[in-house]
Image: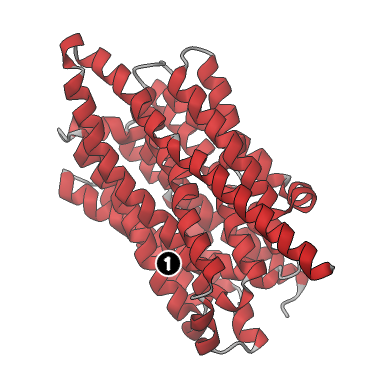
Amino acid sequence: MLANVQKKQLFVASCLALLVTSLSFGIRAGILGRLGVQFELNTQQLGTIAATAFWGFPLAIVVGGMVVDAIGMKKLLVAAFLFHLIGIVLTIFATGYWSLFISTLLIGIANGTVEAACNPLVATIYSDDKTTKLNHFHLWFPGGIVIGTLLVFFLDKVGIGWQVQVGLMIIPTLIYGYLFSKLDFPVTERVASGVSSAEMYKSLLNPLFILMIILMFGTAITELFTGQWIDVLLKNVTDNAILLLTLETGVMVIGRAFAGPVVHKFSPLGVLLISSVLAAAGLYLLGHSSGNMLFAGAILFGMGVCYFWPTMLGFVSENLPKTGAVGMNLMGAAGMFAVSLYMIFMGGYYDQLIANHMENGLEEAKKAAGPEIINVTLIIPIILIVAFASLFLFRKSKNATAAA
């Protein structure tokens, strides 16, 4: 096992890599509307560009999950560094739809490669407390979104263009690339424990794993679609729509920082159930409120989604350990793929809603369409409440029977 100092350095470098992933998410959310104006793109085209990052992610995370045991986590992270660097530079010099499409795809591939390597890395070096440390690692996703959206907000105020805002991501990219190039890596936990590849792939057919994949569709859409589109959907309802994302993700940072006592008190399934209830309540307020109540909705929503992603990964790693890196990465891929499809569908649906409300003028049409999209999305966490409650009661009953 690596020395404690080396473990800490690997964890810090992993957090920096995830910071770049989340900065790309936060900055893209803040500049999406301006890209549409500058390059004369409609909402469906913007939805496709945003979704491209979510296509690249599952592609990279599935391939990375399948090869990480063989080639090692270090080589994957060097590849992530190169994809990030090229994608950021191409975005800065974008000239229209296709250049934005390709650059966003490359950043998505980089983001997926980071998670393909770093999720099993964190689970390996902190094998005695996986769910807590995965939450600590993943706090840098909302953390980076907070930083990214604040950068967009304040740099806009002083007239600094979106190209410079995107270019700022190069700094943490160079730092994490340098750190990973100097550090030694352990083998993955699955390899260290002697579980064969055949056992790993067979375990993917476990009914519990299949159920968690399906539930990952819902948790990912609830969290990531809403976050990526909140500025577009609510900018005609409030003058500070991007700050709703900042507030929501700020709550997520705090929540994930204190994940340890929360997870230990309520259990991962209990946390996921409570999270679904809070996420549904937050979406309801965002879709039915205006003024200051929107900020209350953002706080509730942030409390709801803050534990979704890392706790889903932690639950699978702890309860289905033989699925290994492939299992964790398939979970991430399923979530991102679901988000990409949902974004494309909702981009077209948003344009349709605007057309339906055009008799009141464009601004009023947008004001009506955004909350309607949120209200449709509200159905998903309601379904999750039923699913997680049923799974929680089933496993509790099963454990009680086994103990009798």
Helix, strand or loop for disc 1 = helix
Outermost residue to the right: 404
Q: Is 94 above or below relative to 57?
A: above
Q: Quadrant of residue 293?
A: top right
Mark 1 nearby-residue class (10 Å; few <14, some 14–19, many ≥20): many
Can residue 77 be seen here? The reply is yes
Res. 137 in view: no
What residue sits 59% from the left and 29% below the top?
300
- What's the residue at 48%, 81% (across, down)? 201
Residue toward you, 5 or 379: 379
Q: Position of residue 273 (x, y in %)?
A: 63, 45
> How far from the left and from the top, in percent, is residue 66?
44, 78
Q: In what quadrant of the picture does the C terminus appear?
A: bottom right
Task: Give the left or right position of residue 307, taking residue 370 as reference.
Answer: right
Residue drawn 47% across the image and 16% down it: 289
Residue position for label 1: 61
Task: Name the residue type under label 1.
Answer: Ile
- Residue at (61%, 72%) from the top-left corner? 320
x and y percentages locating residue 165 in the rendered image:
38, 38
Between 265 and 93, the one nearer to me in the picture: 265
Residue 102 drawn at (x, y percent): 23, 55
